[in-house]
Image (cartoon, helix red, strand yellow):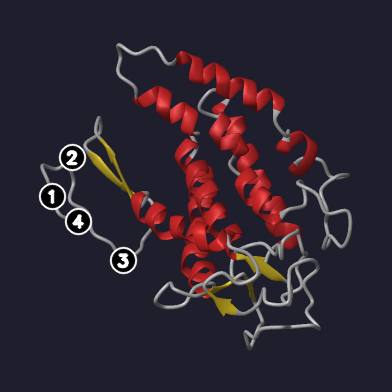
Amino acid sequence: DALQAGEESCSPHTNLSWLLRFAADLHSKGMAWHTDWFGNASAFPRTAVRSGFNSWTHGVNNAQAIKHGAVWARQSDDAIASTAQSLQAWRVLMQHHGQPHGAFAADEHLAGVMPSRGTELCVVVEAMWSLALTAQASLEDSTAVESLDAAEQLAINALPGGLSDDLWSHPYLQFSNAFEARPDTVDHVWASDGLNAGMYGLAPNYECCTSNFHQGYPKLVANLFFEAIADQMVIVSMWLPSSLKTVKVGGGALI
């Protein structure tokens, strides 16, 4: 996505078409998430992964891979099919690992539907961004709406559940039915994370969420409104408390 955006935003006098060729090369040689995983019933786990952990079963990888089709839609010959792959990935994850808060269970690796299994904070913010990109790339309203509805549920339910009010503390894992967050949990139900994965702290269990969760709200806010200049129309992607001063539509109207 960064390579494509770089090429699209460059000066007309600058030839950066090699970025698109590089992106195509990465796509052809990378993990085939649709054919080998989300679209492969014999490979994708339908229950909690208890052994054989790898890059495919890792929760954050799956959250990021949701946008695999949507990102490629910008270069593919069939954008509808590509974005449909992203939506299918989300549906498969939620069917077999979905949780009441709107995210899928992945206490490091895909963890099934039992509400006592956890969801890593990184999974929440990465899934939000993947779904937002899927909506943006969608040529069909139904695909965009389903993606945005899922992203909204993550933003309203799952993300606040994994953060303290002042954003200085978070648990590495959140649980749908947890009643406490404590350290040194020896008798934990999660499969591979450490004893402190369920407690609040600056960087409990591992530092990745500390450096990554900040993308959640800024990217959400940045994608609430879009201006359709040709139609002189403002598109509201989600109904959330917000305001907007238009730039190219409506002469600087305040919404």
Up the image or down, 15 lies above or below 158; here it is above
Q: Give left or right: position of 147 versus 233.
A: right
User: Mark 2 and 1 residues: CB-CB less than 8 Å, in contact?
Assistant: yes
- Of residues 185 and 158, the one nearer the viewer is 185
List the residue tagged with mark 3: 241
In terms of secondary structure, where does tag 3 sit?
Answer: loop
Are there few (<14), some (14-19), or many (20+) residues within 10 Å of tag 1? few
Tell me residue 85's x, y (percent).
Answer: 65, 38
Q: Which residue ends up furthest to the left in the rendered image?
A: 251
| Residue 118, numbered label | none
Q: Give left or right: position of 98 versus 243.
A: right
- Of residues 81 and 189, the one nearer the viewer is 189
Name the residue: 61% across, 37% down.
68
Name the residue: 35% across, 63% down.
240
Mark 2 or 4, nearer chain start: 2
| Residue 255, numbered label | 4
Are there few (<14), some (14-19), or many (20+) residues within 10 Å of tag 2? some
List the residue tagged with mark 2: 249
User: Mark 2 and 4 residues: CB-CB less than 8 Å, in contact?
Assistant: no
**Residue type (three-letter) at the residue carrying disc 2:** Val
Up the image or down, 191 lies above or below 68; here it is below
Tell me residue 14's x, y (percent).
Answer: 34, 13
Mark 1 or 3, nearer chain start: 3
| Residue 253, numbered label | 1
Q: Quadrant of residue 40?
A: top right
Mark 4 or 3, nearer chain start: 3
